[in-house]
Amino acid sequence: MDLTFAPNEAQFRDELRGWLAANGPGPEPEGEDAQYAWRRDWQRKLHEGGWAGVHWPVEYGGRGATLVESAIFYEELARSGHPLPANVLGLLLGGPTLMVWGTDEQKERYLTPILSAEEIWCQGFSEPDAGSDFAAVKTRAVEQPDGSFRVTGQKVWTSGAQYSKWCMLVARTDSGAAKHKGLTYFLMDMGQPQVQVRPLVQITGESEFNELFLEDAVIPAENVVGGVGNGWKVALTTLMNERAGLAFGLQVRLRVMIDELTQIAAENGQLEDPRVADQLGELHLRCEILRLTAYRGLTATMKYGQPGPEGSLTKWMWSETNQMLTQFAADVVGPEALTMGTKWSYELLRARGNTIEGGTTEILKNIVAERVLGLPKAK
Amino acid sequence: MNFDFTEDQHEIRRTARELLAARSPFARVREHAEAGTYDDALSQELGELGWPGIAVAEEHGGQGLGLVELVILLEALGEACAAVPLRGSALAALFIEYAGSSDQQAQWLPGLASGALRGAVGEWSDGVAPLVPDAVGADVLVLLDPDGMASLVAAADASIEPVNAIDPTRRYGKVVVADEGGMDLLAADTSEALRCAEVAVAAGLVGASQRALDLTVAYVKDRKQFGVPIGSFQAVGHKAAQMLFDTEGARSATLFGAWAADADQDQLPLAAAIAKAAASAGGRATTAAAIQLHGGIGFTWEADLHWLYKRAQLDAAFLGGPGTHRARVAALSAERVAAAGTR
């Protein structure tokens, strides 16, 4: 065991820290559209500095970072207080999926604009009747005589759809086949009138997510990824990347907020209250265990090619802890945390989605029970 | 950044678990728990293998390895729930090695390391240590007072009265020292030894949690109700998943604590508090969940779960329970935040 950074890792961290101190996105503007543009500019800056696709192989324009360096990147980015790049879905999901399943032409065409944020990506998997039961998608893609596809259906929870050029779309190409078969993974051009985007207003009042209404949307044959009928497998690649990616940044974000709350409690004299101290102690403990468990998962991945049993736990740990933290903030911070337009009220409301997005805690527990503990499939 | 054991550490873990699976199955644990005895044959074998002295310096007759190796053994002993007093000796040796005089070290460490002598560590206030694990049969006791001072006393200079604690897999005693003149203060700072001891106790709790989880998983796959294995019910599966969550979280924290003790002592105070808090809460929760998921049979004397549950109760309370350590985590974190703020 060596839980320090190796010299090359420390050097990577120091170089990155220096760059992040000298470069930033500037002050955050008001309004969702302006904020998006601001994050897009920020990604361009990251790209120019060579920090956009840190974990991407060098041959695709990335930095070829190791898993530990990639973890360091997200930790340091969170520590700097700078936002995530705008095209986070393209960087974490779309690009890596294409690297596995894409044709040479597709890699050539799509990867660079993902890095530069020239083309933003979104993810069209979930549907009104296919949430956790993702294989139940109903959106239909019908092959035309010229080999292209016409797609009709509805998607939901599509983050950033209003800003996106490309959608990672999973649709049913064979309604006669069994549920998991008959699905195909497409890259759909969002810039066509047959695709309508309607923002969903969430409990925070903002609209990160959208509904997509597709009516005979056109997708050319060359935009199939991984072959017709192979969509389930390709989508799993995307989903695996989703689970592995962000834990380190989230952990640091959590740490920063817990420290802030500790500071507020200290200033208010609330640290003397054993109930407050007990809650803060529990939050610090959970945050540290999340960090350590994420690093254990990384070690296992590097050694055995996949995380051990602990790897399934980090998203669950983070989401529950973030909810605990933001709920507790209401007690420590007081009325300000319950007033719209404040940081803590936003965090309180936004955290409520954490145990749902990217796999509900209930589904994660099913996965742990079935795949890690080997229990019989749940009824 | 590498969380993996070395090859040697893997080997120690493998050997320890294999040996204990063969020598200390629940039938043996039960035999000794019911008779109120320690498994002396096993103790002797472990002494010959050098287990009690694994973290004791070679110059004092130990193997000169670190807390990581001790934690590996204590986790395995916790998993087996083995009826041996080894932990008491290992903890006493930690205090004597970190804080004892060279005379004290020369007097006690070689015997503790070889298993020829037995030790115990207990919490002491107002002249009485009411519930000291491994006290009965110990040759030397380390008594910690609430101010963090530790004293050494030979068993011959103390009165040790057996206590019938709810955990029958260890021999507990009430220790009274009539003449405090027989007590030797450990002169050096004992805080580091205490932090190591907390991590060591946490390791046994992680072992108990792991065993509780393994037994439960096997049971709910096998046990059928309504015509199906009960493990197929989500209410059962989710509770088992929570057991894994608690076990692995405590394991992450305990390994980090052991590593910090060996390699980065600045991080030890916070790491030890987190490990003891997490392993204590986790040990209580997982052993309780194991009984619940076994249903009625889990509540019987015949099932072996209660050995784990009872030991977890005692270990969780020993050297401070979850609440005590959460308070320390909060205090240490607040110090860190304040220091960062004034920089």
Image (cartoon, helix red, strand yellow):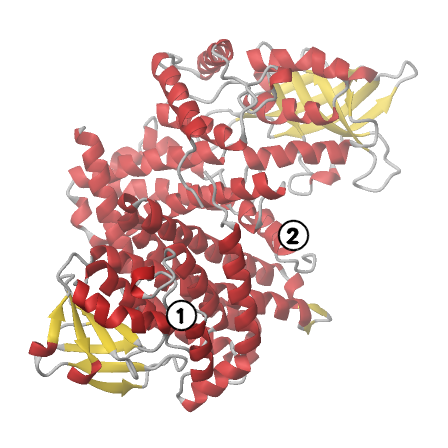
**Numbered label attached to residue B312:** 1
In percent of width and height, residue A240 lies at 63, 36
The type of residue carrying mark 2 is Arg
Closest to the observer, B82 or A321: B82
Q: Give the residue displayed 29% in from the left and 49% down from the top.
A: B268
The answer, for residue A85, to whether it is visible in the render is yes
Taking the spot 67% from the left edge, 11% from the top edge, the residue there is: A191
Q: Which residue has dot 2 on it?
A: A371
Q: Secondary structure at mark 2?
A: helix
Instruction: Give the residue type at disc 1.
Output: Ala
Tell me the quadrant of the picture where the C terminus of chain A can be found: bottom right
User: Up-down: is A268 above or below A185?
Assistant: below
Residues under labels 2 and 1: Cα distance? 28 Å
Q: Indicate whether A161 appears above or below A236.
A: above
Q: Tag on residue A308?
A: none
Q: Quadrant of residue A352?
A: top left
Please, is residue B340 above or below residue A147 in the view?
Answer: below
Residue A190: quadrant of the picture: top right
Name the quadrant containing residue A111: top right
View extreme (front): residue: B59
- The answer to which of B250 and B1 lies nearer the viewer is B1
Dot 1 lies on which element? helix
Residue that lies at the very extreme toward the bottom in this rendered image: B35
Q: Is residue A332 left or right of residue A223?
A: left
Q: Are marks 2 and 1 in contact (CB under 8 Å)?
A: no
Mark 2 on the same chain as mark 1: no
